[in-house]
Amino acid sequence: MSGTNRIAGKGRLVPARTVSFTFDGRRLTGVEGDTLASALIANGIHLTGRSFKYHRPRGILSAGPEEPNALIDISRSSNTHTPNVRATVQEVFEGMTAQSQNRWPSLSFDVGAVNNLFSPIFAAGFYYKTFMWPKAAWKHFYEPNIRAAAGLGVSPKEPDPDRYANRFIHCDVLVVGGGIAGLIAARAAAETGASVVVCDEQPELGGALHHEIDTRIDGQEGFVWAQEIGSELAGMDNVRVLTRTTAFAYQAQNMVDLVERVSEHFANPDKLVPRERLWQVRARRVIVATGAIERHMVFAQNDRPGIMLASAARTYLNHYGVAVGSNVAVYTANDSAYRAAFDLKQAGIAVPVIVDARSDVDAGLLAEAEALGIQVLTDHAVVDTKGGLRLKSVRIERVGGGKSRTVEADALIMSAGWTPTLHLYSQSRAKVVWDEESARFLPGKAVQEMVTIGACNGTDALDALLEEAANAGMEAARLAGFAGASGYRAPDAESLTSRRGALMGAAPGAGPETTVKAFVDYQNDVTAKDIRLAVREGMHSIEHVKRFTTNGMATDQGKTSNIHGLAIAADMLDKPIPQVGLTTFRLPYTPVTFGAIVNHGRDRLFDPTRKTAIHKSHEALGAVFEDVGQWKRPWYYPKAGETMHAAVDRECRTVRETAGLFDASTLGKIEVVGPDAAKFLDLIYTNGWQKLAPGRCKYGIMLREDGFIYDDGVVGRIAEDRFHVTTTTGGAPRVLHHMEDYLQTEFPDLRVWLTSTTDQWSVIAVQGPKAREIIAPFVEGIDISNEAIPHMSVREGTVCGAPARLFRMSFTGELGFEVNVPADYGRAVWDALWARAQDLGACTYGTETMHVLRAEKGYIIVGQDTDGTVTADDAGLSWAVAKSKPDFVGIRGMKRPDLVASGRKQLVGLLTADPKQVLEEGAQIVADPNQPVPMKMIGHVTSSYWSENCGRSIAMAVVADGRALMGKTLYVPMPHEVIKVEVTDTVFFDKEGDRING
Amino acid sequence: MAEAVATRTSPLDGLIAGSVGVAIAQAAPAHRISLRVGADGIPALNKALGLDLPTEPKKSVTAKSGRMALWLGPDEWLVIDEKGDPMADVAGVDAFFSVVDVSHRNTAIKVAGRGARATLEAGCPQDVTDDAFPIGACSRTVMGKIEIVLMRTDANAYRIECWRSFAEYAFEFLSDAAHDCMA
């Protein structure tokens, strides 16, 4: 038997298909198709959690996603768990482990419940007012303790073992909601041939038909009809039916995000099946048929386990075959709760009383109640309840006071009316409008290609709803370009359920005393008195009330609480509700896992890892790699047992003594082609390009409009109308965009085109005295003698038979070549060059050695020795700024007064007094180490290395008026010492620069 | 005299992936050019290339020889040819244009099978339904976190071109998505 409260013959589940699970360690039996909530109630369990702030015992309030109380931690194996799962949504599966949250040591005895005793001091705004002093205590005492005590659930610490998927799809019509309205609209649209997606958050379609068993469509029970039309839709080629799928966000341009719970309900899902799938749907038209959510009654002690929404009780009975109690009282201001009472009574459950806050109740309902032997007290209110961990009794009074009576009940079901579910509508940026007649907010004018239908549109009468839905479906298809009417006719339908009647705000019995706990927002523990207090404290805007009290915040998004809170605030302000206004609905509608949002983009797919064509050879050589942006670059190549320091020293020495091979493929490369190519480069770079002869190269710097250095690199002229531009590794994409931006917006008259060739070429730098000897046997078609290819030249020919651009250039200060071959040949060419280089005693070197060697020569790295506030002059590069050019990007910026004023930080070299001491990059520099703290800092270290070739440490720095301080002593204060440094020029090795021409 | 003749290697050499609904494989090596030219230069280039460059967005043409020209922008085409070198064919054409050899810049992946579109839809936000993206349609778009050029080569077949250094990412993304392509 799957629970003592399971009623034989009721509900739609198959009793024989039992499922075993545990709740707080207790082994329980449910039925396949149960939610955790229905399975718990079947086993007589309502107590499922402790409330957020007061730790009050809480039970299951609802049967849907609006559940504020029953937030459970679910796990299927020992190494993974999910906190804050709504028990009313999670289906049970064999072996599920469910744990209640926010309680210690146990759910029935929770030490934190002491908060409830102190609740008078925990009123709204308490945190804002109380934990102010002393200031330091907030960080170290108050905040951690409050966080530990409050908060729901515990985050898992282990990596998520599940898979998640994503799908971008496009359709003509998206229907959100698979209730009567949504299904009819979907069917009407689908018959035109339009592509239709219909989604519903429940495992089966039907919406309110889950509980409204009195609704008959085409002569069948509504729920049965819904399953039939659902399978018909699913069988159509142009329709996709997604159940267990919540539309949680309505974005711009009719993009609606859905999350499908694919395998959450399986006991042992296939590892390749995703746990959830994100659907990002771009729809020509959206039909929102999200229905309505029943409101609870706001009265004293309305949160005891066993007190729940009437529609939920009806769902548990009619769909799950579970009675929510054996003696169920009713408190309502709406007709629909009567149907719940009648269904319960007819199922053999005692219904001692229906308490109706209204005086004017439909005579037919009263007669029906009488016929069933149910006592109805109109114009009455429930003013208090009793029961610790489960409701025991309710106290009833005539509205306005008088003698009260107590009625025993183990459950109380309630309804204050129905709130149209306008979260998605509102997320689409459309405004809600107050409807005076039905006293509720309804959709106003749509601002996207969208329409609302059914209960969320305030369409109550079934006839009107059927017609509205069918028309909406056909109209949406027509507007999406499917002109032919579908000829679809809405089915005939009839229903006894009425949703007439509404009560907003506090019911009689909710105060006005300030001690009464009449909950408005269960999840955030907000009571009617909190809202009143907020208004008294001066919060007159509903947005302020919301933040002061936290009403309707966080994952709840005001599903049950918003209208009540608003009505209470309006009452206090003595303003009509529409003048107080509704708070904004935030996305997501219900919580969404990070897994679904990240989906495929985790682990190796989190970010692309770019490798050069030569990567595998580097691996074979034992390279240690460094991440440079998305690239993996060889950092250094340690020999067995060698430290990084030793490896770099060896590489640095070998390059200068013999030669080294370096993979420079990641450098950005842009081919600039067209008759106006040189003219364009003149405008982009600070130096001049018109006179550069084909076959020659030049170092260029480019500025931003503000006059600061943006990027640099060597540019080779391949032909009159063709340049081979190189950029920094990190700058490649933005430099291309920078160029393209200027070309299209400022210089559109120039006949020149830009093409990224970064990945086209493998670039092998061969640097050092034996560079020529290494490449010589492989080069064909190019004379590589010093005279034929002087420093800063480029030639086309072949290397190892592959078409090549051979640059004679150097970033080390040594004789150097950079061999560019099409990337697929890169590895083969590298391997061939390396085989010979190795024989000649050369080495491979990585980025660390490259950095040291260039620093020995005073070559800057943009982004290391510059930081976006360094001008060409600051960097000592005035020689690269043409004096005669009338225009280039940044020419005006670099002449701004501040950029030419004295006192600017200039790039200089630094030598420590102790040659063995290596400065820290980023260390601050002062002129006088004995001045009081805070000291005046005049610059900082930008590059600093041990230079094996210089036999000492070297550094570069930017220092105010640094070039005027040559030979002077400055100081670098560090935590444990002050380091003495001498200002020098930036060239530390081969000051004459002869080696480069070797 | 050159001591060795270089051989080609691709980042996807030897890789194959897929699922019950889709096969994912590297395409054959090809010549590729990035062609930039204004309207005035198109006729001369059409003649040299032996095809009519498409002039409408998302259109491609495939010549009898198998040479493909993909429209990527108002003055931009990607020409792909697994046999002849289009670079050689356009050399010397008398027009203002830019041609850059990008044969090795791109790597191509073929995605084919009933689940091919769904595999793509895992990462490509563009509308690739039949009406919006018929056979022969092409576009520069995104997949996951990278830029790709997408071409529909058949009812259930696509060619994905991406930059060489993104090929591993593209292949892994598609392999991951393949597991979910029949949903």
Image: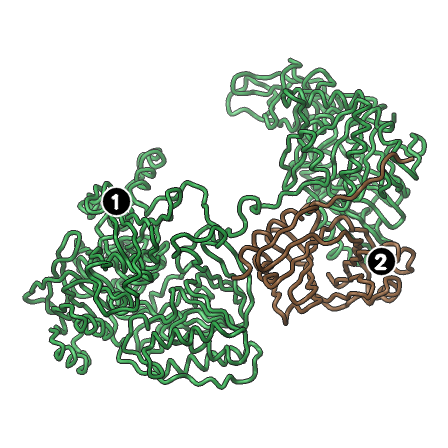
Chain colours: A green, B brown
Between A740 and A149, the one nearer to me in the picture: A149
Between A175 and A751, the one nearer to me in the picture: A175
Q: Mark 2 points at which residue?
A: B97
Residue A447 can be seen, yes or no: no
Q: Gap in Å between the C-alphas at discs 2 and 1?
A: 73 Å
Q: Quadrant of residue A324?
A: bottom left
Compared with A887, A960 (above or below) is: above
Side of A588 relative to A398 (left or right): right
Between A732 and A566, the one nearer to me in the picture: A732
Side of A881 relative to B138 (left or right): right
Q: Farthest top residue?
A: A914
Query: Which chain does the numbered disc 1 sit on?
Result: A
Give the amino acid at mark 2: Phe
Residue found 26% across the figure and 46% down from its top: A25
Q: Name the residue under label 1.
A: A103
Between A196 and A301, the one nearer to me in the picture: A196
